[in-house]
Image: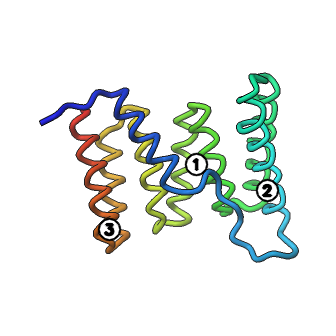
Amino acid sequence: MFSINKPTLAIVLSLILIFSSGVFAAPDDAPGALPEQAIINQQGLTHFKRGYYEMIPRGRKAEAQQEMARAEQAFIRAIEIDPDFTDAHRNLARLYYLQKKYDQAAIEYSHVLRLDPGDIDTYAQMAVVETELGNFEEAVSLLDAAKKETDDDQVIQKLDNYIQKITEAQ
């Protein structure tokens, strides 16, 4: 049997986070007049994309950090308007994850799981955060919980593979 080291596990699990769903969630509302929290969330996404995809690749770190701070403020403001706004919690969690603020990411992903307990991707993303925090048992527990949310054999097999990799890394 092969062994997987912790840096490799972090890379594998980070890829899960990146490829399990879209980069950031857009509101589920129909086109037209959006509620204030959805508009503010979209503004946060615009700041994030500008900082992460335009400024960082060009080496404009200080400006990118300012854009990320604006994105964070927008997501927080959207949540203040509607504490149950799933997309803003999800976006804030992903932002915190990318900033390596794992404790804060875990808090936001917990909100997403409370608001949308059937979202398997969020279980996987939360498991990635828990592995970054060194909470391997909690990560496995989250992936086990995700398996209960689906009947799709392929999804269950992928989750089992992730569980195996985490177990081997402990």
What percent of the width, then of the height, locates residue 39? 83, 60
Task: Give the amino acid type for the residue marked by disc 1 in the picture.
Answer: Glu
- Which residue, given by chain and number where applicable, does mark 1 sit on? 108
The numbered mark at residue 58 is none
Q: Residue at x 82, y 55 (%)?
A: 40
- Which residue, given by chain and number where applicable, does mark 3 sit on? 148
Q: Nearer the viewer, residue 169 or 72?
A: 169
Discs 2/1, front: 2
- Which residue, given by chain and number where applicable, does mark 2 sit on? 42
Give yes or no for contact between labels 3 and 2 (Cβ–Cβ under 8 Å): no
Give the quadrant of the N terminus: top left
Q: Residue at x 82, y 27 (%)?
A: 63
Task: Give the amino acid type for the residue marked by disc 2 in the picture.
Answer: Gln
What percent of the width, then of the height, locates residue 152? 33, 72
What percent of the width, then of the height, locates residue 32? 86, 76
Task: Give the amino acid type for the residue marked by disc 3 in the picture.
Answer: Lys
Image vertical order of residue 47 relative to residue 159, above or below:
above
Neighbour tally class for label 3: few under 14, some 14-19, many 20 plus, Cα within 10 Å? few
Q: Which element is circle 2 on?
A: helix
